Image (cartoon, rainbow, N blue to C red):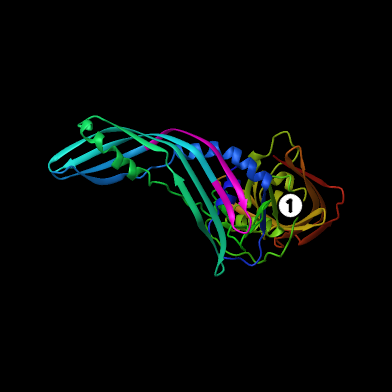
């Protein structure tokens, strides 16, 4: 749901070369959004901070200065809202019969006289309609309000505490001030995915608006929070046909996935330390020099009966390639093996470099993203000639399957 609202309200940003992420909101999607938006608006209104109101009232013998503050919305009700595409312009948004119950505090000052108390404010039968036009402004997307109308049915204020009876006759003045308070907030275009990376959704072109749909082309590039930088590859042009029966259609190029891999690599996330305690005891294989001595006899002689540790990491960015009906993946990784001495110090032994490629496919199965990959080939290189002879092993495995499922 938040993705759809972000899609509708995204703000002006500079162009990129080609989009890696495309989104099309259909007319059906807009109708469904209209039905769900009422609950979302009410939730947001209740958490909205209402700015304080300051002013003065002339009572004939001087001016009473007042401040209405600490206002919050306790209850709200509405009819709608309704959203419609405006061909060639943008989106029309209309909210009707909006009523709010607000509580707050008031303070006054008249010379040396100070007073204060609480208040109940009711805003009822409010109607708001706006049309947002999306234009190209010197290579930047601009969102302009070409029409904005509102009609506040009424405002009722009841003061409590202090000399509240004295200020009740001036309710019409306070009501006029409060009727002007309608604010719109900005939505960021960098979406934080987790503590390591964020997704940039800068627009690459002006949106295409018809009577049936609203299309956005977005940069769709992941960046590392700690060291944001451009990857050593570039997006390519791609097209897709959206389905009118779907609310929201999304299409991503391989650049989006590869930029995510590059961002996580830059954040030093694609690595893990594995020691023997992490391997289940019922498995026949363990990280120690006794078992590795069967492959490298020098280990048992130099470091008898000692535990080992391995640091596995991606040495380069894993690269994905989308082809017709297939996904190809190339992974360059390495494992640094060390001996753990009794005092806890690590003694480096050797590095195992891995160059592997996979091929597979992905699909949606019962609302789950599923995928299956087969290893095409795998090249292993042991790099530590002082300990063991340099060895290269090449495998051609055609029936090795890696299942994957993600809700």
- Could one spot residue 352 in this view of the protein? no
Q: Is residue 166 left or right of residue 312?
A: left
Q: Is residue 197 left or right of residue 215?
A: left
Q: 13 above or below 70? A: below
Quarter occupied by the N terminus: top right
Q: Residue at x 73, y 40 (%)?
A: 368
Q: Which residue is mark 1?
A: 242
Q: 80 above or below 386? A: above
Q: Is residue 344 left or right of residue 151?
A: right
Mark 1, other Cα within 10 Å: few <14 / some 14–19 / many ≥20:
some
Q: Residue at x 33, y 40 (%)?
A: 175
Residue 183 lies, in percent from the top left, at 43, 48
Quarter occupied by the C terminus: top right
Q: 9 above or below 141? A: above
Q: Residue at x 19, y 36 (%)?
A: 115
Q: Is residue 306 left or right of residue 293?
A: left
Give the residues in magenta. Answer: 72-93
């Amino acid at each position: 749901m938040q993705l759809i609202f972000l899609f509708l309200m995204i703000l002006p940003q500079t162009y990129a070369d080609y989009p890696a992420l495309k989104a099309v909101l259909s007319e059906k999607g807009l109708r469904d959004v209209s039905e769900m938006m009422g609950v979302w608006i009410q939730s947001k209104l209740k958490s909205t901070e209402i700015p304080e109101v300051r002013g003065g009232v002339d009572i004939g013998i001087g001016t009473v200065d007042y401040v209405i503050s600490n206002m919050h919305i306790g209850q709200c009700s509405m009819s709608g809202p309704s959203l419609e595409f405006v061909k060639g312009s943008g989106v029309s948004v209309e909210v009707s019969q909006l009523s709010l119950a607000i509580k707050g505090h008031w303070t006054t000052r008249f010379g040396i006289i100070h007073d204060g108390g609480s208040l109940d404010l009711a805003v009822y039968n409010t109607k708001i309609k706006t049309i947002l036009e999306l234009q190209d402004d010197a290579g930047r997307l601009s969102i302009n309000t070409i029409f904005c109308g509102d009609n506040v049915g009424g405002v009722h204020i009841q003061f409590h505490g202090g000399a509240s009876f004295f200020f009740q006759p001036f309710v019409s003045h306070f009501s006029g001030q409060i009727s002007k308070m309608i604010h719109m907030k900005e939505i960021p275009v960098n979406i934080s995915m987790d503590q390591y990376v964020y997704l940039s959704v800068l627009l690459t072109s002006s949106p295409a608006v018809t009577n049936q749909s609203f299309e956005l082309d977005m940069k769709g590039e992941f960046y590392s929070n700690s060291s944001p930088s451009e990857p050593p590859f570039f997006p390519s042009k791609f097209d897709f046909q959206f389905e009118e029966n779907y609310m929201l259609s999304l299409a991503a190029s391989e650049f989006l996935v590869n930029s995510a891999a590059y961002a996580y690599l830059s954040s030093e996330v694609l690595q893990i330390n594995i020691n023997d305690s992490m391997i289940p005891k019922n498995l026949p294989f363990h990280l120690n020099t006794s078992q590795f001595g069967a492959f490298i006899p020098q280990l048992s002689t130099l470091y008898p009966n000692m535990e080992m540790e391995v640091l596995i990491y991606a040495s380069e960015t894993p690269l994905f390639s989308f082809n017709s009906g297939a996904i190809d993946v190339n992974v360059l990784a390495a494992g640094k093996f060390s001996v753990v001495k009794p005092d806890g110090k690590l003694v480096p032994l050797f590095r195992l470099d891995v160059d592997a490629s996979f091929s597979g496919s992905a699909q949606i199965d019962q609302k789950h993203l599923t995928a299956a990959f087969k290893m095409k080939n795998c090249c292993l290189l042991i790099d530590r000639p002082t300990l063991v002879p340099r060895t290269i092993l090449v495998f051609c495995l055609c029936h090795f399957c890696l299942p994957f499922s993600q809700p």
